[in-house]
Amino acid sequence: MENKFSFYLQQENSLFKGKTLAICYKADQKEIEEYGLTSENILLFIKNKAIDNFIPKKSINYFSEIKKMFHKKDIFLRLQCECLLGMYGDTHCDCESQRFNAIKTISENEGIFIHLPQEAQGWGLHYKLQELELQVSGRNTNGEYIGIKNRDDAQRILIGNKNFNDCRKYGIVIKLLSKLGLAKEHFILIS
Ligand SMILES: [Zn+2]
């Protein structure tokens, strides 16, 4: 179980400010399908004063440290669904301002930021570009203009579903937090 997690103690993170613990969880094929993931890597950032005392060149058990540092605390938690277009400047959605606000809250307090690879509600990046092209410019995957479409109509054209179907399942978050020994803690969700 533990080798599905990788840890990297960042000495300086310019977004989360100062020492930050980066964690990557590698989902298996079953989890990818079950939770609507569009890649196998889930990225977490952990901010906590205890991390300031972690020093390089010394052994550490991150699992027990994480459990200890958040014990009986209200933990700020941000679940950030991947939006690569937003991260690269697309202003179609407002997820970037939400992302920066959440990072600010966690950097100024303590907490956990989880980047969920559930691009386009779990349909993936290819789908997302095709859907947005239909919504914004009314062009289909052949580049033909077929009229501006709303999201439901775009999905009907691209996938054939009647109503937009969100594939994301958040059970993976509960699973991750319990694997980190935090299942019983109290979380404040940053929405
Ligand atoms: Zn977005």
Image (spheres, rainbow, N blue to C red):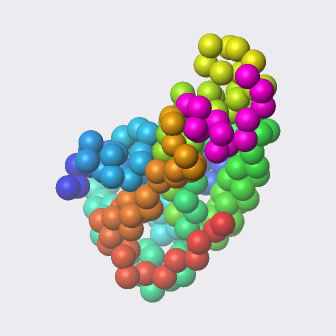
In the rendering, at what x and y percent does residue 154 appear? 64, 36
Is residue 96 rendered to the left or right of residue 60? right
Quadrant of the image containing the C terminus: bottom right
In the rendering, at what x and y percent does residue 38 appear? 44, 39
Is residue 186 rendered to the left or right of residue 179? right
Residue at image point 54% right, 81% down: 74
In the rendering, at what x and y percent does residue 124 appear? 50, 36
Above or below 84: residue 17: below
Quadrant of the image containing the N terminus: bottom left
Q: Nearer the viewer, residue 181 or 129?
A: 129
Quadrant for residue 184, please give it.
bottom left
Residue at image point 70% right, 49% down: 95
Q: Magenta span has 106?
A: no
Q: Is residue 118 visible?
A: no
Above or below 52: residue 134: above
Number of marks present in the image shown: 0
* Span shown in magenta: 146-158
Residue at image point 78% right, 31% down: 148
In the rendering, at what x and y percent does residue 39 appear? 41, 38
Above or below 56: residue 183: below
Q: Nearer the viewer, residue 46 or 168?
A: 168
Above or below 15: residue 128: above
Q: Magenta span has 155?
A: yes
